Amino acid sequence: MVLSTNRIGLFQEAARFIHSCYEELGLSPQQQTLRVQEIEQEIIETGTYTHTEFELKHGAKMAWRNSNRCIGRLLWETLEVFDERQVQTAEEAFEKLVHHIDYATNGGDIRSTITVFAPRTDGIDPLRIWNHQLIRYAGYKKEAAVLGDSANIHMTEMCERLGWVGAHTPFDVLPLVIQEHGKAPELFELPTDCVKEVPISHPEIHGVDELNMKWHAVPIISNMRLEIGGIDYPMAPFNGWYMGTEIGARNLADADRYNMLPSMAKLMGLNTNSNRSLWIDKALVELNIAVLHSFQQAGVTLVDHHTAAKQFKVFEKKEQSCGRAVTGNWMWLIPPLSPAATHVYHKPYKNNIVTPNFFYQKDPE
Ligand code: ARG
């Protein structure tokens, strides 16, 4: 028997992955050949193949290493991989996701973690999660204004259609929406004690705590597809820890998100009538100092953008010494605060897509 044309692509991807993965792990050419033959047989018989546990684990780490938008890739080898491919129901998946949050949060000493659920088979996704991140705040449209996080209005409305009623504060943690293939999406409320949050205060400026800002400790992206050796994992939520600017220069600062710069400027007594007073810039810096200070106070891992850029430089050197070209998406890699003060700004990066990797995917149907 030979491979039909539509399976050749999968086989080639698989073979390419096996060779690089096994090579990196120091496995011999014979072991590589044997495994590739075994996979070829499995694809002929079943149309797909199954990763061994160590292939899955190393493949997921490679996917992080290849994530062009991520400045935190120096730590790719430290990723903790939970193999939950056997999970079949939304209910059980929810339990695993709560475990992921607990494990990753670790009382504030955040651990980079991914939980991998069943792969797509015959074009079918056994399980999908609708949430963009496991922990996100609801956004409610109120006529012209928005209460909460405007980035999540769509998801909030979906939860409401499924019967969820939020408390209508600016920081309501959204429930998870998990879907088994062929079934209606199901709603699961996260236990409040598993969601660690950090209240934002400032080391010097009084009154920042009274702005009642906070943010959740762990960013766990949950809607991307993990691709390893031609196999798609449509549900594989993963997390690192925050870089301060994600919260202080975007989530809380963007005019169409929490828009906190005018309130910061007011507290600081700045002249907001003149652009040339640089009140926006001053408020931004102080808001970011507040985020860095608050996470430190709360004992929650978070990296500042200068340290992150330095770590990325070490990553670039390390990759080069391993003979791998570093790919990157410059627009995403530069921090949104003082970008030109980091080396990343002054360097071109090739945005070539290398697999394994994480990809955007369409929402489930
Ligand atoms: N920027 C996103 C947020 O603010 C999180 C993206 C992933 N970030 C990370 N540090 N791993 O929620």
Image: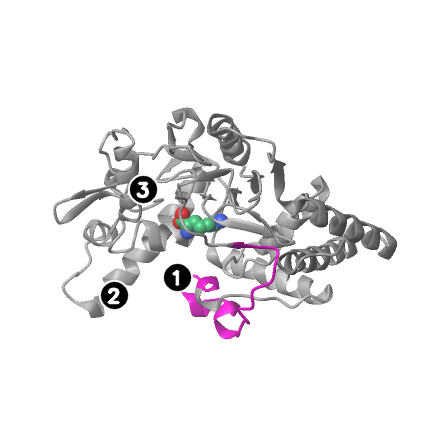
Residue assigned mark 1 = 336
Q: Which residues are magenta?
A: 332-358
Q: Amino acid at mark 1?
A: Pro
* Disc 2 packing (10 Å; few <14; some 14–19; many ≥20): few
Residue assigned mark 2 = 278
Pair 3/2: label in front: 3
- The tag on residue 94 is none
Q: Earlier in the sequence, mark 3 or mark 2?
A: 3
Residue 30 location, quadrant = bottom right
In the image, the residue with mark 2 has its CB under 8 Å from the nearest atom of ligand 1: no
Look at 57% across and 40% down and name the residue there.
113
For marks 3 and 1, give the CA distance.
26 Å
- Does residue 340 show up magenta in the picture? yes
Counting labels gives: 3
Element under disc 1: loop
For marks 2 and 1, give the CA distance.
16 Å
* Disc 1 packing (10 Å; few <14; some 14–19; many ≥20): some
Q: Earlier in the sequence, mark 2 or mark 1?
A: 2
Look at 61% across and 32% down and name the residue there.
86
- The percent coordinates of residue 158 (x first, y second) are 29, 38
Look at 48% across and 63% down and name the residue there.
333
Q: Amino acid at mark 2?
A: Leu
Q: Earlier in the sequence, mark 3 or mark 1?
A: 3
* Disc 3 packing (10 Å; few <14; some 14–19; many ≥20): many
